[in-house]
Image (cartoon, grey):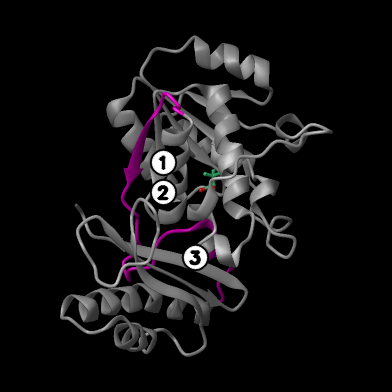
């Protein structure tokens, strides 16, 4: 496995590999969910590349950028075992040299839900992913369904900017009790970890209540009742998978989405209703 950290050597390395090239962008702190993205990429691509970069642009001033877990050596070991061919692990100054000022604004879709709670987050995500795509030039981009709005934002960017890449969404990997895998699960205390699967239970209840015809207000109230009382709900809703506009009732191709805080840790989850 080759590890590169500078733009020009990375371009040369990515340009020379057998195609198709599958690309998995990550912020490191890898878990089984990331390895599932790698496995999906390996299943359909001759070469697999992964980026490891904790992107400062997508963190708000009061968020966890400084304490976000970083373990380059451990991540590389896991990727090598998983059969990854190339890793791009740039420093902050490589991605954002002095004077850097351009960003990608994805519009309304990036301003709802996660975008409302974390202003500027999706501008940061879209900007870094566009830069990474420009360096790696993959045939396929693999994203996890756990970050449903991120997948919608990036699919929007790929369409709007005519990027020549196929976007593949890989189902969420869960613990046995239903908790979606996330690098941020590592922050949870024992009590918060025990409470965290109630977010998925609330999403399931919201879906069930809407599916049996309850109005949205009642359905959200019933779902909220299943969330651990110590957690703080940011939102629970059913949305169009492409636009992330709220819907009154679930329909094929929609997402039931939710986010809640367990102590200082925000967790997201969703249920996709296949088209
Ligand atoms: O999902 C993530 O880990 C990040 O948002 C991404 C896509 C790697 C961009 O920094």
Q: Is residue 40 magenta?
A: no
Residue 5 image point, x, y percent = 67, 26
Numbered circle sitting on residue 145: none
Q: Residue at x 23, y 77 (%)?
A: 210
Q: Residues within 10 Å of mark 1 (few under 14, many from 20)?
A: some
Residue 224 image point, x, y percent = 39, 85
Q: Residue at x 64, y 54 (%)?
A: 120
Q: Is residue 103 above or below residue 14?
A: below
Numbered circle sitting on residue 113: 3
Secondary structure under badge 2? helix
Q: Residue at x 75, y 60 (%)?
A: 61
Range drawn in magenta: 162-189
Pointers 1 and 2 in contact (C-beta within 8 Å): yes
Sequence-first tag of 3 and 2? 3
Q: Is residue 184 magenta?
A: yes
Q: Which is more toward the observer, 145 or 255?
A: 255
Residue 256, located in which quarter of the rendered image? bottom left
Numbered circle sitting on residue 152: 2
């Amino acid at each position: 496995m080759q590890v590169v950290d500078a733009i020009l050597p990375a371009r040369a390395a990515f340009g020379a590999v057998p195609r198709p090239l599958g690309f998995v962008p990550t912020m490191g702190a890898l878990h089984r969910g990331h390895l599932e993205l790698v496995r999906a990429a390996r299943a359909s691509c001759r070469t697999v590349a992964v980026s490891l970069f904790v992107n400062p642009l997508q963190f708000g001033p009061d968020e966890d950028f400084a304490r976000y877990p970083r373990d380059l050596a451990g991540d590389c070991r896991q990727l090598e075992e998983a059969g990854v061919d190339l890793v791009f692990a740039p420093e902050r100054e490589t991605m954002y040299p002095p004077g850097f000022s351009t960003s990608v604004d994805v519009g309304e879709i990036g301003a709802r839900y996660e975008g409302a709670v974390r202003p500027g987050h999706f501008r940061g995500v879209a900007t870094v992913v566009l830069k990474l795509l420009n360096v790696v030039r993959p045939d396929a981009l693999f994203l996890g369904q756990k970050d449903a709005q991120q997948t919608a934002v990036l699919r929007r960017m790929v369409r709007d900017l005519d990027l020549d890449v196929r976007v593949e969404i890989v189902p969420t990997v869960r613990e046995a009790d239903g908790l979606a895998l996330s690098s941020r699960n590592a922050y949870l205390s024992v009590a918060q970890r025990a409470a965290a699967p109630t977010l998925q239970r609330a999403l399931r209840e919201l879906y069930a209540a809407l599916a049996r015809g309850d109005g949205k207000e009642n359905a959200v109230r019933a779902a909220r009742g299943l969330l651990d009382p110590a957690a703080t709900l940011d939102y629970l809703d059913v949305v169009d998978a492409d636009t992330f506009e709220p819907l009154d009732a679930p329909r094929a191709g929609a997402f039931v989405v939710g986010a809640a805080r367990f102590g200082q840790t925000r967790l997201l989850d969703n249920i996709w209703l296949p088209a």
